[in-house]
Image: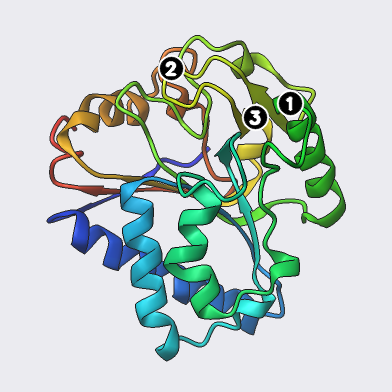
Amino acid sequence: MTSPRIEVHEDAAALAASVAGELLSRLADAQAAGRIPQIGLTGGTIADAVHREVARRSADAEVDWSRVVVWWGDERFVAADDPERNAAQARAAFLDAVGADPANVHEMPATGDAADVDAAAAAYSAALREHGSSDFEILMLGVGPDGHVASLFPGSPALDVHDRIAVGVTDSPKPPPERVSLTFDALNRARSVWFLVSGDAKAAAVSRAVGGADPHEIPAAGVAGLEETIWFLDRASASAL
């Protein structure tokens, strides 16, 4: 495993601009090389800022969004029209605006699509097996103040699941309690993993994750890219490094 690359930006806005520019450049390069890139999105405030910056810049970028396949690392198990869903936020911020092909946008099941979180996780696992490639081109992840990544929380039994692509979470310490999350095994099938982190409340978790903490205590420490891992930080989130 190679050492992670750490980029520290002045503030959240500069971080979002850098990530958006890098994403568009990587996608254009992948398509120029003949690949149909598959990416994993995350949710949260900084991800929303990145998505809006992507939408703003896409008109000048050489990316054919109809040939980008989109997945998510985790999702709230709520109604499909709930604005708190990561997918809803991404659609509103950029997916609809840039012309993503709905057939290539794979949302995690909502409450009306599956009987429960376990059924939703099984359905998403099946979708990844059918439509996914062997790995993600880029997987973007947020990190919580407790070090959680996707919806894998410290001490959760889901951290030790190695026979599934996705798992149902029923006791999330963050509301809502029911979620669907990719497992470590699935998250670690990305060529490039990008952690997007902003704010001093997350500085300690960032420091411990980068320092190689036990993933049972700091789950973000348990995810790395097959080829590279990049931590995109603002000064506040990098303050404990």
Q: Is residue 115 left or right of residue 202?
A: right
Q: Residue at x 77, y 56 (%)?
A: 133
Instruction: Confirm or deny contact between disc 2 and disc 3 (CB under 8 A).
Output: no
Q: Is residue 106 left or right of residue 7?
A: right
**Residue 12 to residue 142: above or below:** below
At x 61%, y 74%, the residue is 100
Label 3 or label 1, whichever comes before in sequence order: 1
Give SS at disc 3.
Answer: loop
Q: Which residue is mark 3?
A: 183
Indicate which label's residue lies in the foreground, 2 or 1.
1
Q: Earlier in the sequence, mark 2 or mark 1?
A: 1
Q: Position of residue 224 (x, y in %)?
A: 52, 38
Spatial CA span between label 2 and label 3: 17 Å
- Tag 1 residue: 116
Residue 143, compared with residue 102, is above or below; it is: above
Mark 3–mark 1 contact, CB under 8 Å? no
What's the residue type where badge 1 is placed? Asp
Across and down, in percent, residue 167 comes to: 69, 26
**Residue 95 image offset from top left, x and y in percent:** 53, 69
Is residue 139 visible in the rendered structure shown here? Answer: no
Label 1 secondary element: loop
152 relative to 62, above or below: above
Counting residues from the start of the chain, the first of labels 2 and 3 encountered is 2
**Which residue in the protein does label 2 denote?**
173
Q: Is residue 158 visible?
A: yes
Q: What whole-number distance in Å separates the C-alpha atoms at marks 3 and 1? A: 18 Å
**What residue is at 55 percent from the left and 78 percent from the top?**
29
Which mark, by number, is residue 196?
none
Tag 3: Cα neighbours inside 10 Å, few (<14), some, or many (≥20)?
A: many
Relative depth, front residue between 90 and 32: 90
- Residue in the foreground of this view, choosing between 184 and 73: 73
